[in-house]
Image (spheres, rainbow, N blue to C red):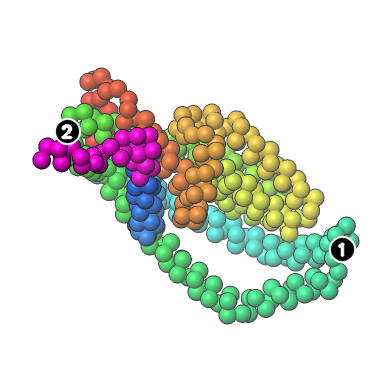
Amino acid sequence: MRALDHARPNPSGVFADRLGRLGIRSGLILLVVLLAAAIVWGLVQLKLIVVPLLIALILAAAIGPMVNWMVRRGVPATLATWIAFLGGLLLLGGTGVLLTMAIRAQWDRLVGAFDEGVEELQALLLEGPIPITSEQIAAARESVADFLASSQFGSGALAGVSIAIQAFTGILLVLVILFFLLKDGGRIWEFLLRPLQGERLERGRRIGRTGLAVLGGYARGTALVALVDAVAIGVALAILQVPLAVPLAVVMFLAGFVPVVGPTIGGGVAAIVALVANGPTVALIVAIVVFVIVQLEQNLLRPIVMGQSVNLHPLAIIVALVAGAAVAGIAGAILAVPVVATAWAAVKAWNEPASPPQRRAAADAEIRT
C-alpha cells in the first residue's frame, strides 16, 4: 500500500512550478474580472435607483456640514435637515423661475435673430472658400424637413417622453434619499458596519470619514469652479449682447459638473447661439473667451479649489469619464469621477494606520450627527 501511494502522482505538484502558479494567478484574475463585470452589469440594470442614490450621496456630503453646523449650535437634527433641504429646493425653484422669465423676455428677439443669422450663415457658406451651392443648401433643408415629418422622429419623440418620465422619477428619488441621508446618514453607516469589529470596524469608520470628505470636497469645489465659469461667460455674453445670456450661463454652470469636456461643450453651445444670433465675428470672440476660461479653470482655478479632493491623474479622470458615459450616459459621465476618486481614497484609507483615540472619537461623533 505504501508503495502504491508513493507511485500515485501528487496533484499539487502540477501547480508547483512557475507555469502552474501563473495559471492559478491567471484564473484568480479572471474570476475577479468576471465578478467586477457582474457587479457593473447588475448596477446598470438597477440604474434607476443607483444613479439617484449616488447623486443623493454627493449632495448629502456637500450639504451635510451645514446641517452639522446647525446641530452643534443647538438646532434639532430634524429641524436642521428640513432647513437645509427646503433651502436647497427654494434655491433651485427660484433659479428655474428666473430662467423661465429670462427666456420669455428674450424669446422674440432670439427668433428674429435666428432667421437673420440663418440667412447670413447661408450667404457666408455660398461666398466662402468651400464649394457649396444653393441647391445643396436647399436639399439639406428638405432633408431636415423630411426627417421632422418622418415616423423615426415621432418614435424619437416618444422615447424622449419616456426619458422625461424616468428623469422625473429619478428626481423624486434623489429628493427622498437626500432627506434621509441628511437626517440619518451617520446612523445608516453605523448600521452597515455592525458586522465588523475591532480593527475592521475602525477601518470601516475611517473609510466613511474619508469618503464623506472626498465627496463633499468634490461637490463643493466643482460647484464653485462651475459658478466662476458661468459668471465669466455670462458677463462676456451680456457685454457682446448675445441673447439668452443668463440661460447660457446656467448651461455653462451645469456643464461644469462634467469633468474635462463639460465647460468646452457648454461654451460651444454659447458660441453656436452667438453665431446664429449675432454673426460669425461675435461667435469667434465668444469661442476665444470660452477657450481662455477653460484654460484658466483647468490649469489654475481647479487645482487651487479642488486641492486633494480628487487626487487622480488626468488620464485616470478621462478613462473614468469615458467609461461612465459608456455605461450610464450623461449621468455616468457626471458621477464617474467622484465615484472613482472616493473608491481610490477608500483603498488608501483602508491601509492607513489607526487614528489617535481623541481624533477618532471626534471624527466618529461628526459622522453620527
Q: Which residues are magenta?
A: 1-27
As for residue 21 lying within the magenta part, the answer is yes
Q: Position of residue 218 (x, y in %)?
A: 45, 37
Which amino acid, by three-letter code, is at mark 1?
A: Pro
Which residue is located at x 75 percent, y 72 percent?
140
Q: Position of residue 272 (x, y in %)?
A: 70, 55
Which residue is located at x 68 percent, y 38 percent?
292
As for residue 76 lying within the magenta part, the answer is no
Which residue is located at x 56 percent, y 48 percent?
255
Q: Position of residue 276 (x, y in %)?
A: 73, 59
Q: Position of residue 190 (x, y in %)?
A: 21, 39
Give the farthest residue toward the left: 1
Q: Write down the quadrant of residue 32 in the picture.
A: top left
- Is residue 110 or residue 338 the one in the foreground? 338
Which amino acid, by three-letter code, is at mark 2?
A: Gln
Left-right relation of 24 to 246:
left
